[in-house]
Image (tube, rainbow, N blue to C red):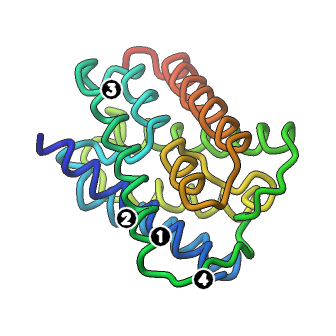
């Protein structure tokens, strides 16, 4: 239960930050920085309890890598999606009106470029999580949260304007619930991000073996 509470809190804060950035129309750089930093602090806050996934694609990758128990996978996914929904509801309560501006929050995405962008971003994120937070070679380090958060920042700046920069099915569900994405775009996030996490995990195992 403690793990699920932590996953809920971390995912909620991440999706809430995304919603706030989209609603307030933050600049691309500041928006990406805020989101990356929100992930960073939540990873540092809860990583020692739940692993600090806050992302179904990360949970998939960590499970395939062998650092997440099978019994935790589905509960993590459920809690992550639930947290995204609650964050969307809170955004709707505290902001009187929304403005879809800047930071790739527009739903005007082209399918193939969005798929490529989401795959690259999610692959990078899960790759960094596995290498900085689960590898024996980096065990006990103090930089894993910074590395993970800044991966999101870099990818959001690089391709956020192409796909919206979710790199996370829970974030994708959150922006769908907030009205910042269509069902079509959410499907891109869901499928592509999970595939990105899968490929990152397989690549990690190919490079590191059983570690």
The numbered dot on residue 154 is none
Q: CA distance from mark 3 to mark 4?
A: 33 Å
Sequence-first tag of 3 and 4: 4
On the picture, is 143 further left or further right than 193?
left
Asked if labels 2 and 1 touch by Cβ distance under 8 angstroms, the answer is yes
Q: Is residue 78 above or below residue 89?
A: above
Q: Is residue 5 above or below residue 59?
A: below
Asked if labels 2 and 3 touch by Cβ distance under 8 angstroms, the answer is no
Give the residue at x 54% y 45%.
168
On-image quarter of the C terminus: top left
- x and y percent of residue 69 in the render? 24, 22
On the picture, is 140 further left or further right than 137?
left
The numbered dot on residue 17 is 1
Where does label 2 land, which residue? 13
Circle 2 Cα neighbour tier, 10 Å, few/some/many (<14 / 14–19 / ≥20)? many
On the picture, is 44 further left or further right than 154?
left
Asked if labels 4 and 1 touch by Cβ distance under 8 angstroms, the answer is no
Judged from the image, the secondary structure of the residue bearing numbered disc 2 is helix
Judged from the image, the secondary structure of the residue bearing numbered disc 3 is helix
Q: CA distance from mark 1 to mark 4?
A: 10 Å
Where does label 3 land, which residue? 74
On the picture, is 123 further left or further right than 47?
right
Where does label 4 land, which residue? 24
Judged from the image, the secondary structure of the residue bearing numbered disc 4 is helix
């Amino acid at each position: 239960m403690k793990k699920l509470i932590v996953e809920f809190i971390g995912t909620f804060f991440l999706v809430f930050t995304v919603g706030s950035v989209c609603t307030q129309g933050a600049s691309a750089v500041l928006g990406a920085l805020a989101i990356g930093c929100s992930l960073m602090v939540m990873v540092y806050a809860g990583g020692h309890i739940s692993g600090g996934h806050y992302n179904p694609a990360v949970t998939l990758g960590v499970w395939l890598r062998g650092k997440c128990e099978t019994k935790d996978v589905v509960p993590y996914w459920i809690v992550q999606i639930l947290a995204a929904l609650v964050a969307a509801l809170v955004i709707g309560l505290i902001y009187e009106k929304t403005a879809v501006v800047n930071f790739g929050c527009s739903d005007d995405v082209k399918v193939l470029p969005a798929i490529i962008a989401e795959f690259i971003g999610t692959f990078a994120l899960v790759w960094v999580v596995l290498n900085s937070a689960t590898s024996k070679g980096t065990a006990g380090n103090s930089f894993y949260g910074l590395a993970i958060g800044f991966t999101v920042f870099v990818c959001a700046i690089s391709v956020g304007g192409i796909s919206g920069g979710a790199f996370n099915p829970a974030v994708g569900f959150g922006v769908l619930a907030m009205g910042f994405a269509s069902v079509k775009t959410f499907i891109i996030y869901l499928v592509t991000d999970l595939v990105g996490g899968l490929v990152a995990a397989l690549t990690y195992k190919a490079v590191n073996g059983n570690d």
